[in-house]
Structure formats: structure tokens, C-alpha cells
Amino acid sequence: MTTCDLAKWTPETGVEPRLRVGVVLPSDQMQRIRLTIPDAPYRLLLDGRAGHAPPAGSAEVVCEGQRVRFRAADRTSEPAGILTIVPASEGPLQRGGGIEVRGVLTGRGFHWQKRTHFRIPGTIEFRVADDHLLVVNELPLEQYLTCVVTSEMSGACPLEFLKSQVLVARAWVLVHTEDKHPGLPIDRCNDDCCQRYQGTTFLTPSAIEAVRSTRGQAIFHAGGGIIDANYSKSCGGIIEAPELVWGVSKPGQRSAVDAPKNSTMQRFLPVTQEKLDEYLSGSWLAQTDCFCSPNIVPEDELPRYLGGVDVGGRYFRWTLRYNREDLEQILRNKVFNGQTPAAPEALATLTDLRPIRRGNSGRVIELAVDYLDPMGHSRVHTITDQHRIRDALHEKFLYSSAFDVRIERDNAGVPTHIKLVGAGWGHGAGLCQIGALGMALQGYDAASIVSHYFADVSIRTCY
Ligand SMILES: [Zn+2]
Ligand SMILES: [Zn+2]
């Protein structure tokens, strides 16, 4: 079957692109990786020349200077600049199929960073880059998508929801041109920085079916190109415009209400300061037809459907109440830490949090932090960007910046508690995952879900 490198792919090529996924990066500072090779035919290539067939069982690849060497119990290869292990055939995917790579770092740089083992299909390439091991898994895009969808979603999800997810993920891979790993011969890494990829380890039949039944289909905007499709867990009721999240507009994306066209929710768009209280806590919430609301997707059922959600988590509407001292400590750690050039003065006492600008979904995109410095002088520090605001106001990360600030004060007017009443989880632009799940539960098909979250788009088969 003809294929082409992702970097050279366009819809006109008419073939499925191949993707190079970095599994071990030089920044992981590894000198060796352990493998378990299944009892299936593979070929070993040393700088493109055929070596012996790698035996089934445990093996490792080690760095020796600027070269790599394959070692198994009774066989050791010559050192090579590039060592490749190629399967005799490439599919179909099977759960747990492929070579096991052991001790791979995931969640790089996050508090959940850990080492895991997982099985990967396709070709695996080993070389030295920046004096450390680089391991690249090269495989067809459709196989990659099957593995990616599996790591985020559970088999309990309705098929039409999974298909909408695959369509969005495929569009994102096909058009996303931002090079997060400059200088490395990879298209994406295996981690949250790009999309989480853990091979065939958690493969489900419904993920396989969702990819198979949408094979080669991409979402095109009215201008003719494939959309740069974003998604987040819950918009909270209103889909945010990308220009209010990233400062750039994207064809096919816009703000809209996450409810049927005739919904009374239309009155909230955009969520201004005047409408905020009603939007966040009005009595309409009890019977709303909003697709991502608990009326459509009960929140206690979310863990069954979506990976990575907190059991018992409330995302559509949530409340967080801080002691002033606790929030001050978070702000000192995150913002007033000597590393934020615009906030050089130490924070002694927080006096107010004032949202200055909001997006269409009520997400705060500019926040003034009023405080007293250690000399008792009043100061203001402004935080722009919903991502930075969410980072600043939570020990880990705030669900979303669509919140109202309610401050309780003592008799002297000093805040005692700061309450954030909020909506949604994530940036809110593009596809709302919980809303898409709600639509699928109500019987909408994948094409209807896609055209609800994106404007003037069509789905076309590219290969
Ligand atoms: Zn990455
Ligand atoms: Zn939503």
C-alpha cells in the first residue's frame, strides 16, 4: 500500500500518511531501553542493511558512543548509527500486540510523571541524538489514531461519540504544523505535550470500529482546508472562540451555545458580567437542554465514559472556596515567586481579584490581582491568558477561567475567604467532549456532532 510521510502529506496525495512518534526522547536522558519481543516475525536492520532476525523474548538496545547496539540473551548485533526493528506485516491491530518497550517516561515534567511499559505496533527505530537514546515508532496514521483514542476514552462510550473524537483527532494531526520538537526526526511525541499515545496496551473494539468506519475522513472548512480542530472536556454551556483563547481565529471555529438551536440558552451568548450570576447559578440549570449539562450526561457516570476524570467530579458548575491565606500562598508559589518579571513586589495581603476581560463563554482572559506589598503599598498585578489565570489560582490547575469571584470580608474590609463559582473544564474552544458525549447519548450521529461544534464544515474522505 502506498503511503507518504506526514510532513509531505496533503489531501491531494490521496494516500494514508505515516507518522513518526518519539517514544524515548534525548531529554529523557536514557542510555538503554529494555524490550520484550513477541513470538512473531520481525527483521532487524543495521543502517538499512539486514541483520539477523531478533529472537522472541527479552532484549535491549544500548547506546555506545554515537552508535546503538541490539542485545538479546544469545545474540548481539554490530553497532549501527540507526537500528530498526521492522514487523513482517503491519496489521490489523490487536490489543497488547507489538513490541513491549519498558520504562518509558510519560507525563514528562508534570506531577504525574512516571515510567510505564507499553506495547507498540509498527516499526521501531533507535539512534543516538544529543548523546542520548532516541526511540521512534513509525506507523500508519490510522493505527496511531486507534491507539490515541483508546488512551482517552473507554469502551462504554457510544460509537458516534468515538467517531466524532476520531474525526477531530485526525484533523488535528493532519493540519497541526506547530513543531514542538525542533531538530528531532519525529512528527509527534508519545505524551500529553502532543497527544497521549500508549500503543496497543488499552485497545478497545469500539476504538478500532470508530477509526475503521471513518478511515481517511477529515473535516474541511468552507475555505477548502482541513480545520485545526481543538477540543476540551467541557465548555460549560458556551463554546469559546479561539481568538479569545489563543489570540488567533481559526476557520471553522466560533462561539456558539452548546444546546439545540431553539434552546433558551441562546440568551446567554455572550456571557457578560451582567448575565454571569444567572448563567452560573440560575434556576434554569435544573432543566436545561445544554448538551454538556448533568441533565444530559449525569456527572457520576462520567468516569465510566471518559478517561482522566475525577470520581465524583463536578465540571459543568463547580465552586471553590479558599481561605485568603491559602490563596495567597498559591499566588506566591505561582506568580509572586521572583520569576515573574511583571510581579516583582512580594505579595503580603491579597485585597481583591477583579476580572477585567471575559471571552464569550464568560472565561476570564484578563484578571487584576489587587494586593498590599510588605510596605503596605497598594499594588495591582494583571494576569492575561486563560491558561495563566488557571495556573495562578490553583495549586495544580483550575478547571476553567469561566468563574465569578465572590469575596467575604471582615469588619475592616480585609478578605477572609475567596469563593470562585465556575463553569466548565478546559479552554472551551472547538469540540466539547462531554457535550459531544451528551449528543451521542441523545441519538445524534458523528456528522451532526461535528457540524454542531464547528461552523460551515464538511467531512470528506482523503484516502
Ligand atoms: Zn510532544
Ligand atoms: Zn459543552
Image (tube, grey):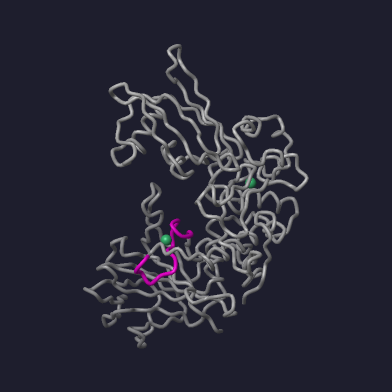
What is the quadrant of residue 59 in the picture? bottom left
In the shown orientation, is residue 410 left or right of residue 378? right
223 with respect to 442 (left or right): left
Asked where in the image residue 217 lies, by quadrant, the reply is bottom right
- Most common SS among magenta residues: loop
- x, y percentage for residue 444? 74, 55
User: Measuring 36% from the left and 28% from the top, which residue is drawn there?
Assistant: 379
Based on the picture, tell me whether residue 185 belongs to the magenta stretch: yes
Q: Could you tell me which residue is drawn at 50 percent across and 70 percent down?
A: 97
Magenta stretch bounds = 182-196
Furthest residue in direction top, as rendered: 411
Residue 105: percent from left, percent from top: 37, 58
Could you tell me which residue is drawn at 28 percent across and 38 percent down? 338
* 65 or 181: nearer the viewer: 181
On screen, residue 273 above or below 222: above
Query: Please, which residue is most extreme toward the left here?
Result: 65
Decide: is 107 above or below 2.
above
Give the camera-side residue of 401 and 155.
401
